Image (cartoon, rainbow, N blue to C red):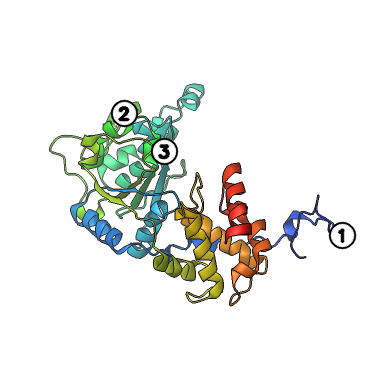
Amino acid sequence: MTYPYFTKGLPIDQRSRRAEEIPTLDRTRMEEPSGYMPHPDLTHAVNVALVLGMPLLLTGEPGTGKTQLAYAVANDLACPVHKFETKSTSVSRDLFYTFDAVTSFKQRDITDQRLFLRYQALGRAILDAFPATNPTVAALLPPPGQSDYRHAGPRRSVVLIDEIDKAPRDFPNDLLNEIERLYFRVSELRNAGSPGAEPGEPGIEPQYRPIVILTSNSEKGLPDPFLRRCIYFDIPFPKAEEMRDIVAERVSGLGKTDPLLADALDLFFRLRHGRRETNLRKEPSTAELLNWLQILMHRGAKPGEALKLQKELVLQTLSTLVKNTDDRREASDFVSTRW
């Protein structure tokens, strides 16, 4: 079975096949944490956050690897990742746990309210930082076999709080003490709290302190009191030589000196920064470049051959790089007449 797989509207005498027969690309290598290549200054920022025990706040263009850093750190330090996906409706409690009030009301014969709790990213990481024999932790854990939560402590975890700028402005302000001292309270259990919630009570030992990584697309600013409690790093967009290294690591069959890659990067950076040549509203990202190179290789672009000699193939795959009508028109014109 050869490309194209969906043939309606194309002058091709080939019937579409079953969906299961389509050789969809395996994206595992593109997302493998061991292949993540951080900027050297980002590596230093991670180490500063680790030593100080402070959250690391990352900004940067979409597709520059903010989210993937958490998995790379966890892979390198041999610890699990707990991810919290921030929404516009998120409140600070959601980062620690949620409570199924509806089911609790319907099943009023069940008096153990712990059965209706679901611990979320930071809540799980805090509980896992203590042994299950800790009496305060034991009071928060559901009875064995009656919940999908399995306590795995004591251990250290990476907590990824993704796109925190999506949340209401009060969200980071409401976390100031909890994210610094790493504790939380469960109001549904008569305000029972994790270790460290009470004044003078010992909290998490430093070697088990969760490694908190937050990402932001800078859609709106974060409060100054919250920023003071974070280590901050803005991930720069990779330069051409850095991008060659990233592609060689992520896309099989392409070497750093390959003519096809040289042409692909030339077009990519001219679409991004060639303001005198192109004027795209949304510049393509690293992730979109990798996707584009993957489909080019699948479509038969041959390593060792110049991509400028395969313009028809480039035009057919531009939808991977450009994401609106005006940019598509501009990019297509540039490839056809000026590249």
Q: Are marks 1 and 3 in contact (CB under 8 Å)?
A: no
Nearer to the camera, 288 or 335 = 335
Around disc 2, counting alpha carbons within 10 Å, would you say few (fewer than 14), some (14 to 19), or many (20 or more)?
Answer: few
Q: Earlier in the sequence, mark 1 or mark 2?
A: 1
Quadrant for residue 172, please give it.
top left
Q: Which mark is residue 86?
A: 3
Image coordinates of residue 151 in percent, x first then y, are 37, 49
Position of the C terminus by quadrant: bottom right
Residue 34 falls left or right of residue 337: left
| Image quarter of the N terminus | bottom right
Q: CA distance from mark 3 to mark 2?
A: 13 Å
Side of 304 relative to 124 (left or right)? right
- Mark 3: few/some/many CA within 10 Å (<14, 14-19, 20+): many
Q: Which residue type does callout 3 highlight?
A: Thr
In the image, 173 versus 310, the foreground residue is 310
* Residue located at (61% from left, 55% from top): 318
Residue 278 lies, with reference to residue 216, above or below; the image says below
